[in-house]
Image (tube, rainbow, N blue to C red):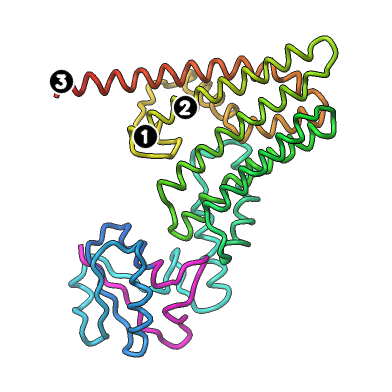
């Protein structure tokens, strides 16, 4: 499909190289059009804008053939499979500062996901989007945000090993911020069109090993508790080990699928449950999502009983590891059968 992008500037229109949410408008229009299936782009620009337009369209993310021409050289719009204006983003034609704010708001609102958990939907995502809006026009990359988010878990672990009420509360507080900021890298990647397989892997690995570190260090911090300290410590270690095993087995499947996105594990999974069973399973899955779980850990830390939750964390980690192992074995067995059948 050949697409037409109209980039002629008119009175009140932004320049072709003006940015919105960290990305030049013309590049944004080209990437959106490419995403809609265009195999060739024709960009119409005024003669004095053509050098800037050609430089912008050399962006390596634009993988389709691009030609830039003047208004008199382009075919009639009806000749193209898709036509768009470079300054019309998220169904807003950019003319005023209010237009730009509304377009930016819509771009970030589109980052909300149906798979967001209860806490993410009502708390975390609101905060992460607000932060992403603040940094989207800075050089901060999605992968740098992932690294910063993971660093919070390291600081949380350093606090958790000390034990005691305030260090444990501080560790849980940082893990809650880890959960909040975990949304920022994906939001920046989506809004700026900077998504990559490396970014997917960094995000998934960062999430998994943040939890492993937290459970292990929480176990260390529980050791001084009289009479039950050693037991709680082992529960923390089991929690870390179980989550680590689950992560590693998941990586085997993801690598075979050619994706680093954790949600690729559920892609195409048939939902066979209906009625009350489906409702109950859906409610349990919602509660057990990481966003809810880490928020619950913060509440328990505030109440001074987080270490006691290590019993449940150990059991949950064992179940999670067994589930991941079963899923991995089933996946590779199905692949083997398909290979033999082929």
Q: Earlier in the sequence, mark 2 or mark 3?
A: 2
Q: Secondary structure at mark 3?
A: helix
Which residue appears at 84% of the width and 28% of the height? 164
Crowding near the residue tagged with mark 1, few <14, some 14–19, many ≥20 C-alpha atoms within 10 Å? few
Does the magenta-highlighted stretch encompass residue 25? yes
Residue 300 left/right relative to 261: right
Query: Residue 36 lies in what quarter of the image?
Result: bottom left
Return the mark for residue 255: 1
Query: Residue 258 at what x, y percent from top left?
Result: 34, 38
Does the magenta-highlighted stretch encompass residue 27? yes
Q: Secondary structure at mark 2?
A: helix
Which residue appears at 43% of the width and 52% of the height? 195
Q: Earlier in the sequence, mark 1 or mark 2?
A: 2
Residue 223 left/right relative to 137: right
Q: Quadrant of the C terminus?
A: top left
Marks 2/3: CA–CA distance: 28 Å
Which residue appears at 44% of the width and 18% of the height? 325
Marks 1/2: CA–CA distance: 11 Å
Q: Farthest residue toward the left?
A: 342
Return the mark for residue 341: 3
Residue depth check, mark 2 versus mark 3: number of the one nearer the observer: 2
Magenta highlight range: 1-28
Residue 206 left/right relative to 154: left
Residue depth check, mark 3 versus mark 1: number of the one nearer the observer: 1
Q: Find disc 2 in the rendering and name its residue.
A: 248
């Amino acid at each position: 499909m050949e697409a037409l992008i109209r980039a002629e500037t008119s009175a009140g229109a932004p320049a072709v190289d003006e940015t919105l949410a960290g990305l030049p408008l013309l590049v944004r229009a080209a990437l959106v059009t490419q995403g809609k299936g265009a195999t060739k782009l024709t960009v119409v620009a005024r003669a004095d804008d053509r050098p800037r337009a050609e430089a912008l369209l050399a962006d390596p993310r634009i993988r389709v053939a691009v030609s830039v021409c003047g208004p008199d050289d382009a075919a009639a719009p009806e000749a193209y499979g898709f036509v768009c204006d470079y300054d019309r983003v998220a169904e807003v034609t950019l003319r005023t500062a209010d237009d730009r704010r509304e377009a930016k708001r819509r771009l970030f609102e589109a980052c909300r996901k149906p798979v967001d958990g209860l806490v993410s939907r009502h708390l975390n995502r609101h905060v992460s989007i607000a932060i992403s809006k603040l940094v989207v026009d800075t050089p901060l990359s999605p992968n740098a945000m992932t690294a910063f988010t993971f660093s919070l878990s390291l600081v949380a672990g350093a606090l958790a090993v000390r034990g005691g009420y305030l260090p444990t509360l501080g560790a849980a507080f940082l893990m809650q911020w880890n959960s909040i900021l975990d949304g920022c890298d994906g939001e920046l990647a989506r809004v700026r069109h900077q998504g990559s397989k490396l970014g997917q892997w960094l995000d998934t690995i960062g999430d998994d090993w943040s939890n492993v570190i937290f459970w292990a260090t929480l176990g260390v911090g529980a050791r001084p508790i009289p009479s039950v300290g050693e037991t709680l410590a082992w529960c923390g270690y089991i929690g870390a080990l179980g989550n680590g095993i689950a992560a590693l087995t998941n990586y085997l499947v993801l690598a075979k699928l050619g994706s680093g996105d954790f949600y690729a594990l559920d892609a195409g999974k048939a939902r066979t449950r209906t009625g009350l069973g489906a409702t109950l399973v859906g409610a349990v899955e919602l509660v057990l999502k990481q966003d809810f779980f880490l928020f619950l850990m913060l509440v328990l830390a505030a109440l001074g009983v987080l270490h006691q939750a290590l019993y449940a964390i150990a059991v949950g980690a064992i179940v999670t590891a067994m589930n991941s192992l079963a899923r991995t074995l089933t996946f590779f067995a199905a692949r083997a059968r398909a290979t033999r059948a082929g």
